[in-house]
Amino acid sequence: MTVTIGYDKPLYVLPFDHRATFSKNMFGWKGQLTAEQTEEIAAVKQVIYEAFQDCLAGGVPKARAGILVDEQFGAAILRDAAKKGYITACPAEKSGQDEFEFDYGSDFARHIEEFQPTFCKVLVRYNPEGDKELNRRQAARLKHLSDYLHKSGRLYMFELLVPPEKSQLDRLKGDKNTYDLQLRPALMVQAIRELQDAGVEADVWKIEGIEREEDCQKVVVAARRAGRDKVGCIVLGRGEDDRKVRQWLTTAAGVPGFIGFAVGRTVFWNPLVNYRANKITRDAAVAQIAASYHEWVEVFEKRLRPA
C-alpha cells in the first residue's frame, strides 16, 4: 500500500477555535448570538492572535508555529494569517456535539476553499468499545472529508478524543485517572486503526496527553502503519493545569513521530478571564498568553528528537 499523506515537521499549534466554550463558559451566553455578541468574542480572540504574533517576533520559528481558529469568530484572523504566510488550521465540525457533524453540512468544502487553511481540523469522540452504529456513521462522514481533502491537496488534522464508556469506568470504580493511564492508550491505538481501515487518512493526529513513553510509541506505530511513514502526532492540552501539560509534552517530545502540540485553554483562559474582569490590561493579557505559549515551545524543543 502506497499512501502519500502525512506531515512530519515540528508543529506548535495555539488553538482557539473554541466556540460553545467561549460563548457559554467565558461569556455566559446561550442560544443564537447577536451580531454584537459575536463581535465581542471575535475581539477577545484577537488578543490571542496578537500574543501569537508577538511570539513569532520574539523568536518562535514561523515555520513551526500555527494557529487553529474558527470561521465564526476568527474569519478576520484567518484571512490575515493567510496573507502573512502563517500555518493555519480551521475546524470542520459543528461545535459542542457528541457525534461528528459538519458545521456547514454539505457546504463544508466551500468554506474550506474560502479560507484556504493549511490544515482542516476535526474533533471527534470515538471509543472503539462504544456505540458501534455511532462510530460507523462518524467514520463514513470522516472518510468523505478525508477523500475531499486529499483529492484537493489539503492537510487533515484529526483530534481524537476517547471518552470513557460507563462500563469502562465501572470496571475502574469510576477512577478517570486510572482510565487515562491504563485503558485510554490502547483504545486510542484501536480507534486510529479502525478509522484508518474505514478510509480516514489523517496527516496529523491530535492526541490526548499520554503518561508513558511506551504508550506514545504505540500510538505512533498505529498512526504510521502500512506505509503512513510521514504521519505526525501532536499532544493536546485538554485544558489541564501547567504541571500536567508539562508532563505530557515532555513525555511526547522524546518520542520520534510526536512532532508538537496544540495547547489552548491552558495558555489563554486565565489571562482572558482576568482581562474581561478588568483585573489586568489588554497588553498584560497579550504578554501572559505569549509567555505561556513560548514556554510550551521551549519545553517541547528541549526534548524534541528527529521524526
Image (tube, grey):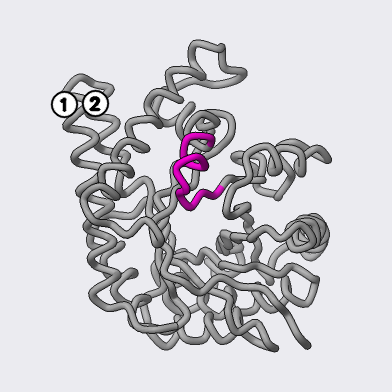
Q: Which residue is mark 1?
A: 280
Q: Amino acid at mark 1?
A: Ile
Q: Which circle marks residue 275 in the picture?
A: 2
Image spot of residue 57 (x, y percent): 25, 47
Q: Mark 1 packing: few (<14 Cα in 10 Å), some, or many (20+)?
A: some
Magenta part of the chain: 79-89
Determine the image quadrant of residue 274.
Answer: top left
Callout 1 touching callout 2 (CB < 8 Å): yes
Q: In this orientation, which residue lies closer to the viewer: 194 or 291?
A: 291
Q: CA distance from mark 1 to mark 2?
A: 5 Å
Front residue of this view, candidates 13 and 162:
13
Query: Measured along the vertical axis of the image, is residue 183 above or below residue 266?
Result: below
Instruction: Specify whether residue 246 is painted magenta.
Output: no
Q: Residue at the location (43% across, 72% down)?
A: 259
Between 227 and 36, the one lying in front of the other is 227
Quarter of the rendering occupied by the C terminus: bottom left
Q: Earlier in the sequence, mark 1 or mark 2?
A: 2
